[in-house]
Image (cartoon, rainbow, N blue to C red):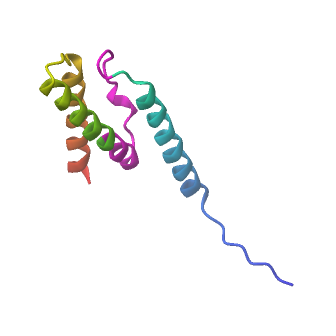
Amino acid sequence: MVEVRKTIPTEEVNSVVASFLSNRCLETYLKKFEISKETFFEGMIKTDEDVALLERYYLNSCNKASRLVMDDEYVGITFDNLDVMSKVIRQNKHVK
């Protein structure tokens, strides 16, 4: 019996693995990130998948911050972080 296997170039495998690990790191960072107390580090964004994940986080955080403002709660640094995230998202969309 003859067995046929398709091989994937090492560069392609490394790219997929790096993208997955980068996305997992960003996801972990965002889960622990306290947007109302910490400054966002934009250096975590390296791939298109990172930008998509950041965009989802941004939209959820923006909606939550807007609700808090309507409820007369102070959100302080939250909007500064949202501005940085918005800038990163816009810059990466123009690159495509």
Q: How far across and down, in percent of the image, does residue 94 sit?
A: 20, 49
Instruction: Report whether residue 68 is seen.
Output: yes
Could you tell me which residue is drawn at 30 percent across and 18 percent down?
Answer: 39
Pick the residue in front: 93 or 63: 63
Is residue 80 placed above or below 94 in the rendered structure?
Answer: above
- Provide the residue span drawn in magenta: 35-54
Q: Quadrant of residue 3?
A: bottom right
Q: How many marks?
A: 0
At 27% from the left and 37% from the top, the residue drawn is 58
**60 or 22, which is in the foreground?**
60
Seen from the viewer's position, the closer of residues 1 and 61 is 61
Q: Quadrant of residue 76?
A: top left
Q: Indicate the quadrant containing the N terminus: top left, top right, bottom left or bottom right.
A: bottom right
On the image, the x and y values in percent for residue 2 come to: 82, 83
Residue 5 occupies which quadrant of the picture? bottom right
Of residue 10 and residue 44, the one placed in the foreground of this image is 44
Q: Is residue 86 above or below residue 12?
A: above
Looking at the figure, which quarter contains the C terminus? bottom left
| Residue at left offset 15%, top offset 24% | 71
Residue 27: say if magenta. Answer: no
Asked whether residue 83 is in view, the answer is no
Q: Residue furthest right?
A: 1
In the image, taking residue 59 as reference, residue 11 lies left or right, namely right
